Image (cartoon, rainbow, N blue to C red):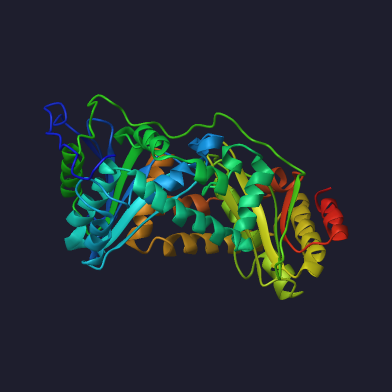
Amino acid sequence: MTSRSSKVTARPSSEARAVARTQTLIKGENGIGTVRKTTLPGGLRIVTETLPSVRSATFGIWAHVGSRDETPALNGATHYLEHLLFKGTAQRSALDISSALDAVGGEMNAFTAKEYTCYYARVLDTDLPLAIDVVCDMLTGSLILEEDVDVERGAILEEIAMTEDDPGDCVHDLFAHTMFGDNALGRPVLGTVDTVNALTADRIRRFYKKHYDPTHLVVACAGNIDHDKVVRQVRAAFERAGAFRNPDAQPIAPRDGSRTIRTSGKVELLGRKTEQAHVVLGMPGLARTDDRRWAMGVLNTALGGGMSSRLFQEVREKRGLAYSVYSYTSGFADCGLFGVYAGCRPSQVHDVLRICRDELDQVAQSGLTDDEIARAIGQLRGSTVLGLEDTGALMNRIGKSELCWGEQMSVDDMLAKIAAVTPDEVRSVARDILGQRPSLSVIGPLKDKQAARLHDAVA
């Protein structure tokens, strides 16, 4: 069994001190909004965005690994590992990690997705060196002890149970399975009770060593910060951990579009004794690199992105059939999803589905009006800016952009892309996406006759 005192701190080698490559990706006015990137020998990328007008900073590390990198037997390993990196290193116990940030009023957390994982801390700008040291130590020095794996297994099983108790959340996992089947994108990020119980400390350690190499990581930091200081502090932390084993290693490239998954016309029903029926009706969408994604964003906003959207007006405002109804898009490296969610009384599920299907068919055939498109463009531009008003959102934007696209886009360029969307482009993507045969996922107390009729909704 490994103990926390057993780690040997590596001394920086001459190769590790080789010259780093730094470039300015976005030049802001008077330094505000400037995005810089440094690539260290060994393949670690560090991107920062300066915002001198605030007194906070958010520091994060993005890992190029998500649940779609798991085999069926490893389902849930990425999320399990996310938990375990908070359990202690050779330098800090789990209590040391949490108390260090609590003592300065900081926030610390992590999240796992289908294609990436992120660990982050938000602190006062003066406490940024502490946040960098703690998060880097977690990412490079986790011990993954047997007893920690056993303890955290119980917490993860409770998290799975909590998700299954929330059908409004669980239906989206069901819809992913409906669309993608029994492959990595169709399996839940949390894993299942069986796969989590079967995971061992040894298997998780091997997964950790494979996917947490510096070439698979992107460091992102935003706020009242100095790029060069951040680079020096991160480099020192990784060198102390002996993480730079190959100074000639290059960063891993963003995932490519190696395959496209197409599924249509499937129906999956899960019987639950709930007060509502939770419904997702949808079809294949666009990959996140598709040039049509800007038009798709406008289409999604007009259909189900706000109180003035078609679905909200038709389902809730005019008929009062649901409290929550919205549409959404999810883009992956090689494919995507478009979905419409609604929660309603079981007796009204057929009416809700009929209205949603009618609206999708109508937009696919006739398109949106120019007024609807103009309103959606304005709403999308406003929400894009408002969603980037804190250092955490800025860190997420630059970190995800580097990991998933390998490039940065300024807010002004993003707004220009949205504003440049034409009605013809929106109508074209509506025909391509909404014209496909949909699939359907439903969770609720459905009777046999109701279940049989639901198949007609995708016919």
Residue in view at x 49 percent, y 36 percent: 69
* Left or right: residue 180 compared with residue 135: right
- Residue 390 appears in which quarter of the rendering? bottom left
Give the image location of residue 162, x and y in percent.
Answer: 54, 61
Residue in view at x 81 percent, y 65 percent: 351
Give the tally of numbered discs: 0
In the picture as drawn, the residue positioned furthest to the front comes out as 1
**Against 320, is 70 above or below?**
above
Q: Nearer the viewer, residue 107 or 359?
A: 107
Give the image location of residue 414, x and y in percent.
Answer: 45, 51
Q: Nearer the viewer, residue 168 or 221?
A: 168
Residue in view at x 54 percent, y 55 percent: 160
* Left or right: residue 10 compared with residue 181: left
Q: Is residue 27 visible?
A: no
- Residue 106 appears in which quarter of the rendering? bottom left
Q: Nearer the viewer, residue 182 or 369?
A: 182
In the picture as drawn, the residue positioned furthest to the right comes out as 449
Q: Is residue 359 visible?
A: yes
Q: Nearer the viewer, residue 76 or 418?
A: 76
Residue in view at x 51 percent, y 49 percent: 190
Give the image location of residue 157, x and y in percent.
Answer: 51, 54
Give the image location of residue 262, x and y in percent.
Answer: 68, 37
Q: Quadrant of the N terminus?
A: top left
**Against 145, is 347 above or below?**
below
